[in-house]
Amino acid sequence: MGLAFIQFDSMFDQIESQHQNHIKGFAKNIKNHFRSAMSKNKNITEIISKNKTIQTAFIQNNTKQLCKKAREFRILGVYDIFFMDSSFNILCQTNHLQNISFDQPKLPIFQKAALSSQCSLVDIQRTLYIIAVCPIIAEHQRVGYVVSLIQVYPHLVDEIISHLQIQLKINYQNKPISSYLDNINVDSWEAYTFLFTIDDISLEVTLYENSIISQLLTKSRQSHLYFLLAILAVFISGIALFIRKLITPMNQLVNAMNKYSKGELKLSLLPNVQNEIGNLSHAFHRMIIDLEHAEQRFGRIFEYSIEGIFQIHPEGYFIRVNPALVKILGYLSPEELIESISDISSQMYVYSEDWERFKSMLLEQNQVKSFEVRLYQKDLSIIWVSINARNVRNRNGEIICYEGFLIDITERKSREEFEKERKALELANHTKSEFLANVSHEIRTPLNAVLGLGKLLYKTELNNLQKEYLDDILNSSKILLELINDILDYSKVELGNIQLVNTSFYLMDIYQNIISIFKQQIQTKKMAFVFHIPKECGIELIGDPIRIKQILINLLGNAVKFTDKGQVWIQTDSLHKTSGEIYISISVTDTGIGIDETDQHRIFQAFTQADASSTRKYSGTGLGLAICEKLVYKMKGKMYVTSIPTKGSTFSITIPLTYDENSNKPIKSPPVYSRILIIEDDEVNAKFVKSVFKNENMDIHILPDGQDIFQYLIQYSYDMIFMDIQLPGIDGYELSQHIRQSGRITLPIIALTACAMKGDREKCLAAGMNDYLPKPFEPEDVLAIYHKWKGALQLESRPLEKKSIKPDQKQ
Ligand code: ADP
């Protein structure tokens, strides 16, 4: 059974909504009346129950909607009862509903009622309600009547009644309705029930008075409430059913989400349903997989980062730390670190105010960058770290932790400190050097005056005691002047005030000059003194000869100073020669006191001496080597020492020099002559040595002892002497010493001796001999030692012509 209300009257808009609802409830009452009436007729009930469902539509006053509904529900076929309001008829006359056919009769009262829409609200409430009927067509037959509830305004009642009378054969209790209608007093009527009988169907229709309707409405309101409750129950059970369908997968999804949010990263079960939840679950699953990948990626970064990564609670304890941080802070595991530190400020920050500073910076700027601070490690050693951190906030904007990373910058910091100290030291050193340079310069002037005046004083008439005092004064002044000069030199080098010159020179000239300086000292010490310059170093070189000479004077001065007996030998070599450039190595070797290995590094520092006690004996300032090293460095060369205590030392320098490849200038190196003196009392031995040189086109003299040696030495300039130690009369040691004393310090003397005992060689060297050839020897040994020493520089003048008078040769 269809039940339709068509409410299309602006009048209803004006009525309170409560009233509208009452209309609904009232319609229900009407419907019940109608149903009970119909149930009396079996046929109709059957037809209705077979073909129709009870359906209620409440169509609001929207023309288009009405038309649509009208068509949709086959308005005449589906609904059994229409409750239409008065304006509906107007609508029927519009084009919208033209093709909807209502069986006649139309209810003309509608039209009239429409006019009443202008009525006041009071009028409306005082209206009559009338039920009108029109035939219902279903399945091509009339199955019932539309019963319309019409609000009828008092002034229209008569007209309505008359229409009813006209159009319906209304009987009530077998009397025409008109007979009743006559009794209707509009002002006081309560209810009239009509029984409509149409085609044998009787229909009881009750006409209510307004106040009765109100009662009905109240009733219906209650029933409406029940109805609402029923609707609600149905709705709730529907929802429950619906939810049951959704709830299980939804629960699964929510569970999975909860687990995930608690950190359970492995997803156990996700709903597999074909609806929106399924889609959601799919999307969630994809998101988790992406997150897992991202987590893995970032997890690896966290685990293997070399930076220490952390999350710190604002109250000052660690929430999370990575292995790098654990290592930086010297702990064994993240757990140990997190458990050990409950107050970062006091346990980790060396200065707790740094922690406060760190926190307030974060508060102000929300992040800190390169925050450098000192932290304690587990073992309380202090490290410098640089921290980058930011605030992590919750949705309410409160800081929940600080998150960031730090790196260990201890090394960089100590480098910086060192650099700072070095600069400060450099500055202090510079100031010191400046001061020394100024002071020594100032001292030199009066000292020069002392020396100059002393020398003048020397020329005046002085008694012996005065001369002695004056000697002391002059000697002391010289020593002082040397010291001042050294200091000045050193200061200059330190200040970088020394400018190297580039000029051409011969090493030979430098050596000869040096020999003249030290000759006296060497002779006094009865030492051998040999220079050796190979041909390739005898060329004209380009460099700073003054500074090279200064270095060699220092080295030679030390060699002579620290050697009491034996020899000093300057060996020159070319290490590397390319076109225009030559690396020269010059070594100064002595047989002096030597230097302990531990002291060998120190002696190049200024004012440092190997053995303070020996200094008193040998005097000195400890500046010479420091100056030499700095000068060599300035020449882009190197300087080093090898030494054996008590045996002697070798100081070597290697410096790059240039030369003119196209120069025609002559080579200057010691002349190599071939005049040898053999002093040997054993004739056979002497002859043997001579025979070794037979192919060398040499002038060989033999003497059986040292008796006439000086006569020979004066007459012939020998290049080398081979001397037996056990000679008749004066022995080889003594003879050598005499030769050195005579000023022949560079003449190589080679000992030939049968004494091959330990210490014999040293004894020979100490006696001023250059080398030592133990018997028995082979011809090659003799030649080797000859070649080793030939070319050594001899200071003695030699006769011009090569072949001169031969001495007596006892052959
Ligand atoms: P000085 O000789 O004026 O003390 P140097 O700087 O020239 O200063 O030498 C520093 C120290 O090195 C010397 O005091 C000495 O102890 C050691 N030394 C230098 N040359 C030699 C050498 N040839 N033999 C032994 N010791 C040497």
Image (tube, rainbow, N blue to C red):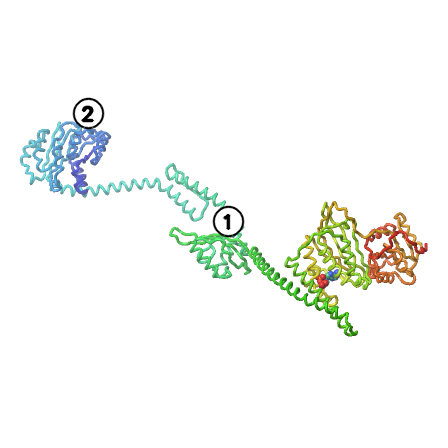
Element at badge 2?
Answer: loop
Q: Position of residue 480 (x, y in %)?
A: 71, 67
Question: Is residue 223 toward the left or the right of residue 788 in the image?
Answer: left
Q: Position of residue 808 (x, y in %)?
A: 94, 56
Taking depth in this image into account, of 514 and 244 the one nearest to the observer is 514
Residue farthest to the top, as pictured: 140
| Kind of residue at disc 1 | Phe
Taking 93 as reference, is 401 above or below it? below
Taking depth in this image into account, of 331 and 548 the one nearest to the observer is 548
- Work out which quarter of the rendered image holds the N terminus and state it: top left
Taking 728 as reference, is 405 above or below it? above
Q: Establish whether ligand 1 lies closer than 8 Å to the Cβ of label 1.
A: no
Residue annotated with mark 1: 302
Q: Tag on residue 140?
A: 2
| Res 438 visible | yes
Q: Nearer the viewer, mark 2 or mark 1?
A: 1
The quarter holding residue 286 reads: top left
| Kind of residue at disc 2 | His
Q: Position of residue 95 (x, y in %)?
A: 19, 28
Other-residue count near label 1 (Cα within 10 Å), few / some / many at <14 / 14–19 / ≥20: some
Question: Is residue 363 toward the left or the right of residue 143 in the image?
Answer: right
